[in-house]
Image: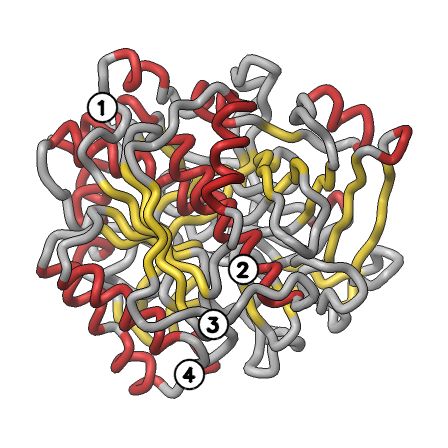
Amino acid sequence: MFRRLMAIAGGALALTAATAGSAAAHPAATPGLGHAQAAGGTHLHGLTWRFVGATTAPPTTAQCLAAIGIACYSPGQLETAYDMRRLYAAGDSGQGRTIVLFDSFGSPTIAADLRVFDRQFHLPAPPSLRVLRPVGPVPPFDGSNSTMVGWAFESTLDVEYAHAMAPRARIVLVETPVAETEGITGMPQLMRAENLMVDRGIGDVFSQSFGATEQTFRPQTLLNLRYAFENAARHHVTVLASSGDSGSANYKLNGVDLFRYPTVGWPSSDPLVTSVGGTQLHLNAAGHRTAPDNVWNDIPIGIDAAGGGGPSHVFARPAYQRKMATGAGPFRATPDISMSAAVDGGALVYLSFPGLPAGFYIVGGTSEASPLFAGVVAIADQIAGHRLGQINPSMYAMRGRPGSGIVDIRLGNNTFTLLDGNNNPVFVVPGWQAARGYDMASGLGTVDGYTFAHALAR
């Protein structure tokens, strides 16, 4: 269900929103994606709200607040919030490292859009931006196809914010020809593409902003798909995945209805993957915090979307989680770490592909969180002088130690409430509360980029 909330005077900017779990969440009437659900059930972990602007300059936080009552943040504000500028000042901004982003279809204007994004936010161009299609050509882009438009939006977010956090890292966008939905659809192509990148030695950090509910797979089918992650682990490639945007709930195989009990998505739930959950930042114009971070949950502002997390129903508790009370019993708990994902505090993205007005958009969701964290890991790789590979054992070992750079999140929860068109609750799926130490709402917490990158590199 889409809700047009308010337009800035003169019609230059408008906010369009989609409820995360609505049965009418398909964007047939409005191009693009809401809670990352497109025709056919595509679930990308992001694109929850958009600030549509056919403008020549990005809005400021103050302008977003005045116009629509929610905050929007620039790359510079996020760099300050995550203490990345100290890394850049020391000459550590991802040089020599490669971040690989995986998306169905991709975006036909990604190179041009990144140039505008960099110019507007005073970022250097990356050393290289490559677009690869290792498992075959993608269909011609169709701006009237909401699924393609949604994936183009996702691709743009991934590229722009991985680059924003690690501005001197090489960027590779891998496009696949079949849209990932729920269950197996689209996953074989994505996993084959990831495996080929590992085999070809392309990439130090992989970021995945897609996922499907574990219950939409046959368990053995899911286990047969994870060969790419096993190969990545052997080659010391770090693999990240967004934890989801429906809090404790996730979609059924039809891509419309939600499970009414706690579920999680894969590949986020895979023990060989770092699951990246969502937080909400509270920043001033300079990027300094005005309040502590909390778990992302936008239901109080009338949008049923929140950071994913909970116990896997497929994977056993990995060794790196055995020395702590995760609340997941004998199962893998997610997420592992969290970064900015809230709609109220979303990232500003520039795009110009057909199907949407060119301009700046506010984007929330764990699709933002995963590429942000990919940038931090790429810089840690640079500091270490080599690939760090699977980082979960190191992160859990660092937890609670002085100088780890892991910052505990103690506020908020990821309980999911489906809202109707009048913002009345339809049903509630209980989630998890942030607490001291590990919790299934925020994982280990979030990071101070400077301290964390150095600690991880050690």
Tell me the quarter of the image containing the C terminus.
top left
Above or below for 367 versus 292: below
Residue name at image x 47 percent, y 72 percent: 180
Look at mark 1 in the image and give the residue it sits on: 402
The quarter of the image holding the N terminus is: bottom right
Q: CA distance from mark 2 to mark 4?
A: 22 Å
Near mark 4 (Cα within 10 A), the count class, few <14, some 14-19 or many ≥20, is some
- Image-quadrant location for residue 334: bottom left
Q: Label 2 sits on what residue type?
A: Trp
- Tell me how far mark 3 sits from mark 4, CA to CA: 13 Å
| Residue, disc 2 | 151
Tell me which label, 2 or 1, sits earlier in the chain. 2
> Upstream in the sequence, badge 2 or badge 3?
2
Q: Residue at x 29, y 87 (%)?
A: 220
Give, as a three-letter code, the residue at label 1.
Pro
In the rendered image, residue 113, in percent from the top left (x then y), is placed at 53, 39
Element at label 3: loop
In this rendering, the answer to whether 248 lies above or below 205 is below
Task: Give the label on residue 217, or none.
Answer: 4
Q: Earlier in the sequence, mark 1 or mark 4?
A: 4
Q: Secondary structure at mark 4?
A: loop
Direction from residue 316 to residue 246 in the image, left or right: right
Please state the horizontal and vertical placement of residue 400, each as a whole percent of the image.
Answer: 26, 33
Whether residues under marks 1 and 4 lie with C-beta atoms below 8 angstroms apart, the answer is no
First in sequence: mark 2 vs mark 4: 2
Q: Closer to us: mark 2 or mark 1?
A: 2
Q: Which mark is residue 180?
A: 3
